Amino acid sequence: MASPYTLPVQAMMALTRRPAVVAVFGDRVFPGKVPKANARWPVLVYQAVTGHKERGMRRLTGVEFATFQLRIAAKQEDAVDAAWQALSSDWEPPANLAQMHGPGWRIDRLEFRDCHMLEDPETAMPYAVGSLVMKIVKVSNDATNP
């Protein structure tokens, strides 16, 4: 049965289930926004911003590019910074890319961009905002595990 999610969303969901991410955020990873009932920190919020499929001369190549906005919030700035460092140290190393795959796809490249530390004007709570650009390649099922 085909997934109801787009390829980039499938990839992002897989990234957020990696052990290093679960160790920092647990089940506090949300698409879109943090639920008002959330009382535990830190949290990771992701949202798809842009995406496109690469075209060859007469067909799609099976490569997709996607940009996600990431937001990490916590009670203290040090906790935000530590969570961001944990995320980037797990996702960025090229050696980890071989583990980032799913049925019919693999992540070929990840790149963090434009991380900024900010403060919520209503709550004075610190948070970081940045972008994650990923290149996802469709693969045949027998080639999912490189």
Image: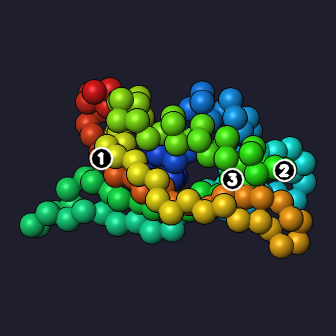
Q: Residue at x 52, y 42 (%)?
A: 88
Dot 3: element: strand
Q: Which residue is mark 1?
A: 137
Q: Is residue 146 left or right of residue 96?
A: left
- Please provide percent x and percent y for residue 71: 65, 58
- Number of other residues with Cα within 10 Å of mark 1, as a class: few under 14, some 14 to 19, many 20 or more: many
Q: Is residue 141 above or below residue 109?
A: above
Dot 1: element: strand
Q: CA distance from mark 2 to mark 3?
A: 11 Å
- Please provide percent x and percent y for residue 21: 62, 35
Q: Which residue is mark 2?
A: 75
**Labels 2 and 3 touching (C-beta < 8 A):** no
Foreground: disc 1 or disc 3:
3
Q: Is residue 72 left or right of residue 114?
A: right
Q: CA distance from mark 1 to mark 2?
A: 37 Å
> Of marks 1 and 2, which one's residue comes earlier in the chain?
2
Amino acid type at mark 3 = Ile
